[in-house]
Image (cartoon, rainbow, N blue to C red):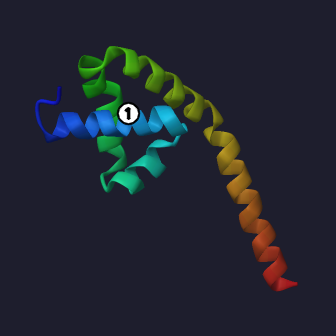
Amino acid sequence: MYYNEIDERVCDIAEYVAATGATVRDTAKLFGVSKSTVHKDLTERLKNLAPQLYEVVKNVLSKNRAERHIRGGRATKLKYETEKKKTS
């Protein structure tokens, strides 16, 4: 089914994201590649390799993008709460 190592990586990454709903950043860390590589794999290469899986992954990426401001706000809140506890 796979033509080369890149195709295999693309499918492995896509299956992981579809199963876990992981972010591009977390996926990149796990697979040892850059965020831009993960993004290109999921948005460009996957479309030709596995169209059905591409649709699932596209929905996960859209959901993560819509929620990223919420995650950022939580991280900032946690940062300042931690700093406040250290100074108290």
Q: In the rendered image of this protein, does residue 7 appear above or below residue 31?
A: above
> At 52% across and 22% down in the image, what residue appears?
59
Q: What residue type is labelled 1?
A: Ala
Dot 1 alpha-carbon crowd within 10 angstroms: few under 14, some 14 to 19, many 20 or more: many
Any part of residue 21 in sight: yes
Any part of residue 40 in sight: no
Where is residue 43 shown, x and y percent of the image? 35, 27
Where is residue 68 shown, x and y percent of the image? 61, 40
**Extreme residue toward the front, this view:** 1
> At 40% across and 34% down in the image, what residue appears?
15
Where is residue 24 shown, x and y percent of the image? 45, 43
Question: Callout 1: helix, strand or loop?
Answer: helix
Q: Quadrant of the C terminus?
A: bottom right
Q: Mark 1 points at which residue?
A: 14
Q: Which residue is at the front of the view, 19 or 78?
A: 19
Q: Is residue 28 left or right of residue 81?
A: left
> At 34% across and 52% down in the image, what residue appears?
31
